Amino acid sequence: MAGVGLGPLRTMGRQALLLLALCATGARGLYFHIGETEKRCFIEEIPDETMVIGNYRTQMWDKQKEVFLPSTPGLGMHVEVKDPDGKVVLSRQYGSEGRFTFTSHTPGDHQICLHSNSTRMALFAGGKLRVHLDIQVGEHANNYPEIAAKDKLTELQLRARQLLDQVEQIQKEQDYQRYREERFRLTSESTNQRVLWWSIAQTVILILTGIWQMRHLKSFFEAKKLV
Amino acid sequence: MPRLGYAQRWAAAAGRWGCGLLALLLLVPGPGGASEITFELPDNAKQCFYEDIAQGTKCTLEFQVITGGHYDVDCRLEDPDGKVLYKEMKKQYDSFTFTASKNGTYKFCFSNEFSTFTHKTVYFDFQVGEDPPLFPSENRVSALTQMESACVSIHEALKSVIDYQTHFRLREAQGRSRAEDLNTRVAYWSVGEALILLVVSIGQVFLLKSFFSDKRTTTTRVGS
């Protein structure tokens, strides 16, 4: 009797756990769809010594049931991060749900690319993948409740720590802006130089070719006895 | 159907209540967050993003085109029923705030289908609800002390500073990409034009010579 009584209880318990799991894993994040072998890249323009944390979760499209399966084991995502010079900073294969972290050592455009290379997908022609993605940069990447617990900070101290982190991020961004402005200025000055040299060179070439043309034609016509 | 014992009935009721409560929690506008993403939009492509939003949540979508062509993109925001909340063609930068009128999946798409060969880099910032509070038990009724409210206002001010910095960085990236384009174009064009000039002037002379070097020359002075 106890066994039969617990049956509906078990299903309700499972449903409750599913709802809780959905809540806990942040089912309310931003998501998008990608194809089987499609590669999606995102750009993060960040100053140096900045930490970036990315969380993702994938769901596969089930063609028969026309619904996205809640979680598919065996689904893998390859994450590749390149720094502004094109050097690969991170290149790893994660499961269907993963979290990647990297810290920038050069300021500039970092490229984060995701693609699925799961062999199971090959069976479903035209399969889609739903990817939930969340990228946090700098101060947003800090987990304050964890920091408070680890360093045993009071509420006020934690708030002060958050403000300090924010101000540090602003400072880094200002430094990066100074570096960018310098590059911009160098580019503009180089363009200015090139235009100057080019206009002088053009005029010289024009005059020289004009002189050469006239002399050559004059000697040609003299040879032909037309002049 | 065998009668359930008292404990089982209580547990079943608790389970139902628990489910109901969780379902209610999912519907109540809770702590949201912001998603800031920069991505590349190839030519003739359209990319869509989705988010599940609870009713009553105030959301803001802000986007800016960083590089590519005329720095414009089509943007479209739809609610769960497919009704278009926001639609703009060929916009460089815009910000749109709305309150979610119903629960469900909201979809916004960026389209570069009008462009034939320029791919664009688009930045967007989708803010849903308020940022998660610093302390999990933030919803307390007691008022904040003066120090704490000062901290909160400084935090909000610094957030807006970071936001302005981001927008400044994006505009500066636009300007810098144009300047770098100009620099490469001037380099290639100057070399190319010098070559063309040389080729054309030498070619002219030889062409002219070829006009005069056919067999029957009409004007030949006869030497005496």
Image: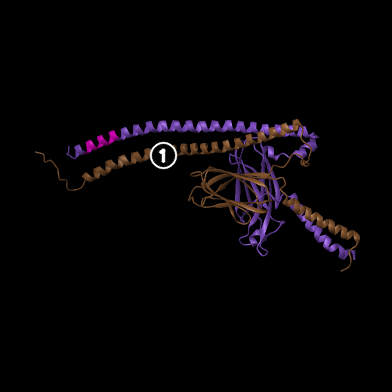
- The amino acid pointed to by label 1 is Trp
Q: Residue at x 53, y 39 (%)?
A: B174
Q: Position of residue A127 (x, y in %)?
A: 63, 59
Q: Position of residue B64 (x, y in %)?
A: 56, 43
Q: Position of residue B2 (x, y in %)?
A: 89, 68
Q: Is residue B64 visible?
A: no
Q: Which chain is purple?
A: A
The residue where tag 1 is placed is B189
On screen, residue B184 versus residue B84, left or right, reads left
Towards the viewer: A118 or B203: A118
Q: Residue at x 40, y 40 (%)?
A: B192
Towards the viewer: B213 or A16: A16
Q: Is residue B20 visible?
A: yes
On screen, residue B207 versus residue B98, left or right, reads left
> Residue A214 occupies which quadrant of the picture?
top left
Magenta-drawn stretch contains A211: yes
Q: Position of residue A24 (x, y in %)?
A: 75, 49
Magenta stretch: give its range: A210-220
Against B75, is A175 above or below? above
Give the position of the C terminus of chain A as an image quadrant: top left
Q: What hue represents chain B?
A: brown
Towards the viewer: A186 or B195: A186
For mark 1, name the chain: B
On screen, residue B69 versus residue A76, left or right, reads left
Q: How is the image coloured?
A: by chain
Q: Secondary structure at mark 1?
A: helix
Magenta-drawn stretch contains A103: no
